[in-house]
Image: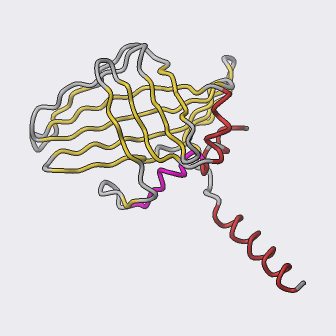
Amino acid sequence: MKNIVLALFLFTNFSVFSQKPCEIDTNVTDSLGTYKSTKQHIIFERSFAGNSTNIFFALSNNNGVFGIETQILQRSGEFIKAICFDASSRIYLQLRNGKIVTLLYAGSDSCGTFIRDDKNGNNRILAGTFAFAKENYEDLKVSPITFMRIKFAGETIDYPFKTEFVSEMDKKKYEPENYFINYLKCIEN
């Protein structure tokens, strides 16, 4: 009996301490409705041979429609080919439980912005909002993501998810596989 009580106590403490705190970036209510979004998190980072790609997600709730504000940052000393979002763009998330969740692009055609930095490096930033359907929303709360595929206008690129990594950009630890498990609760209410 003591072992059962001890196990229950430890389980309760671990589950309380393992939940991530909500970091809300925007929370607005006005005559048009409500909009709430979380702080951006790096969910993918790749750096190789002077080229880097970072993908950021921020969850949003726009009048009850849940979505992901997605930002892709590419850096290189060489020319960076444009990648674009259009009406056919999608994000496919493969969950550990075998299901695939599809997010639909909810914006106008965009190829992002090209910027040269002060060190003569090339940077390309592409941002867009993807909405998810109610039927696949619940799966994201319980199953980690193992793989992401983004269908751009004209090409598809695959991004494997890591369990965790320390970002070269800001030296913080991120857990992309559990991003939705940890943060979907932040935009639900």
Eyeballing the image, is 93 above or below 107?
A: below
Q: Is residue 138 magenta?
A: no
Left or right, residue 155 beside residue 136: left
Picture coordinates of residue 130, whole percent (x, y) = 50, 26
Picture coordinates of residue 66, whole percent (x, y) = 62, 29
The quadrant holding residue 14 is bottom right
Picture coordinates of residue 78, whole percent (x, y) = 9, 37
Image point (42%, 48%), residue name:
161
The quadrant holding residue 137 is top right
Q: Nearer the viewer, residue 127 or 179?
A: 179
The quadrant holding residue 140 is top right
Left or right, residue 8 beside residue 118: right
Eyeballing the image, is 42 above or below 149?
A: below
Task: Please give the range of residues in magenta.
Answer: 172-180
Q: Outermost residue toward the bottom?
A: 2
Image point (41%, 20%), residue name:
89
Image point (70%, 38%), residue name:
188
For the C terminus, the image quarter is top right
Q: Nearer the viewer, residue 183 or 141?
A: 141
Image point (46%, 17%), residue name:
107
